[in-house]
Image (tube, helix red, strand yellow):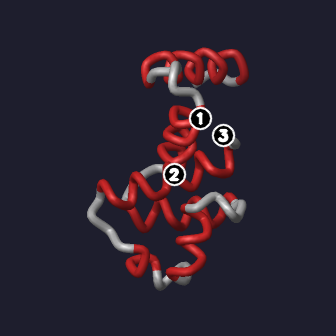
Amino acid sequence: MEIQKALGLAIKEIRISKGLTQEFFSDISSRTYVSVLENGKKRPSIEKIDSLATAMGIHPLTILTLSYLILDKELNIAELQNKISSELEKIKSV
């Protein structure tokens, strides 16, 4: 699976878990565009990811994190969080 498809599945999974329809995003995207994203046929900009996340009441990194968890079924949340924390500490004092 490629990351674009995993990203679409993550958006869809979060949307459904929140009980939202594709029409919910009508202020920021058409239902058709959301459907195309969820099917992994378009690459959303970081601004679009941010808008979708804000509309769903989550942090944009939640979408990206879930995408990578979908992409790599052997990876678990704790391992990914530890990896990200470690990398960020090496880059910048957090």
> Residue 74, image x and y in percent?
52, 19
Q: Are marks 1 and 3 in contact (CB under 8 Å)?
A: yes
Near mark 2 (Cα within 10 A), the count class, few <14, some 14-19 or many ≥20, is: many
Q: Amino acid at mark 3?
A: Met
Near mark 1 (Cα within 10 A), the count class, few <14, some 14-19 or many ≥20, is: some
Looking at the image, is mark 1 or mark 3 nearer the viewer? 3
Which residue does the numbered mark 3 point to in the structure image? 1
Vertical order, 71 against 10 (above or below): above
Name the residue rendered at 53%, 44% in the picture. 61
> Residue 63, image x and y in percent?
51, 48
Vertical order, 48 against 76 (above or below): below
Q: Taking 21 as reference, is 35 left or right?
A: right
Please report whichever mark, 1 or 3, sits nearer to the chain's N-terminal start.
3
- Quarter of the figure that contains the C terminus: top right
Vertical order, 48 against 73 (above or below): below
Circle count: 3
Question: CA separation, marks 1 and 3?
Answer: 6 Å
> Residue 16, image x and y in percent?
34, 59
> Residue 3, image x and y in percent?
68, 43
Element under disc 3: loop
Near mark 3 (Cα within 10 A), the count class, few <14, some 14-19 or many ≥20, is: few
Q: Could you say which is closer to the camera, residue 44 or residue 9?
A: 9
Name the residue rendered at 30%, 54% in the picture. 17
Please report whichever mark, 2 or 3, sits nearer to the chain's N-terminal start.
3
Which residue does the numbered mark 1 point to in the structure image? 71
Please report whichever mark, 2 or 1, sits nearer to the chain's N-terminal start.
2
Q: Taking 72 as reference, is 81 left or right?
A: left
Name the residue rendered at 45%, 58% in the picture. 12
Element under disc 1: helix
Instruction: Identify the mark at residue 9; answer none if there is no mark.
Output: 2
Q: Taking 6 as reference, is 78 left or right?
A: left
Question: CA separation, marks 2 and 3?
Answer: 11 Å
